[in-house]
Amino acid sequence: MTKVAWNTKELTVGQLAERSGVAVSALHFYEAKGLISSRRTAGNQRRYSRDSLRRVAFIRLAQRIGIPLKVIKDALAELPDERTPTRDDWARLSAAWRSELDDRIEQLQRLRDDLTDCIGCGCLSLDRCPVANPHDRLGDEGPGARRIDTRICPPQTACCTAAPAPASAGGS
């Protein structure tokens, strides 16, 4: 890792990427979305203030817990003078996101619990599967999986010896 002097006021995009662990392309993306900002030198190079490190860390942590970039941008816009989030800012914002995260966790747990039988058998037509096939509608079509085209094999396998799948009309 390149050592940056502790008293350096500005970082190049490469230094910010190295110190934050975020790809240069992601930093450019964050800047394009208005999440971070830089100034341009006379040679048109980006320079980021040191506090951009904390701002990027804030963005990455919020993303990691599932907060959309639009919500993160709105949260950062609430800070006065576009300053870097403090510990108190994080506590306030994360508290506001807590109920949304709790709802998401509850939905995922319910989905996990409802899918256990279907994942185990793979038929997707059980009358007790309220997620994949309410009221066993697919069971009227016959045995086996109804939502999966069994004629199509995963790429680079020789599992199918039957007739090839029909070509799509639209092409790709």
Image: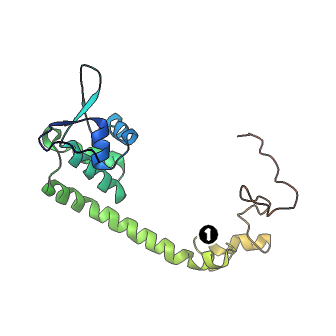
Q: Position of residue 159 (x, y in %)?
A: 79, 64
Q: Is residue 27 above or below residue 144?
A: above
Q: Residue at x 11, y 41 (%)?
A: 7
Q: Circle 1 sits on which residue? A: 132
Q: Which three-letter amino acid code belongs to the residue tagged 1?
A: Ala
In this view of the protein, can residue 28 be seen by the observer? Answer: yes
**Measuring 17% from the left and 45% from the top, which residue is drawn there?**
84
Q: Is residue 1 left or right of residue 6?
A: right
- Determine which quarter of the picture holds residue 39: top left
Locate the C terminus and report the quarter of the image it occupies: top right
Q: How is the image coloured?
A: rainbow
* Residue 87, quarter of picture: bottom left
Residue 120: % across, % down: 62, 79
User: In the displayed structure, would residue 123 be above or below residue 35?
Assistant: below
Question: SS for tag 1?
Answer: loop
Query: Is residue 35 visible in this depiction of the protein?
Result: no
Badge 1 crowding class, 10 Å Cα cut-off, few under 14, some 14 to 19, many 20 or more, is some
Most extreme residue toward the front, as rendered? 2
| Vertical comparison of 40 with 110: above or below | above
Q: Is residue 82 left or right of residue 69?
A: left
**Residue 110 horizontal/vertical position (percent):** 46, 74
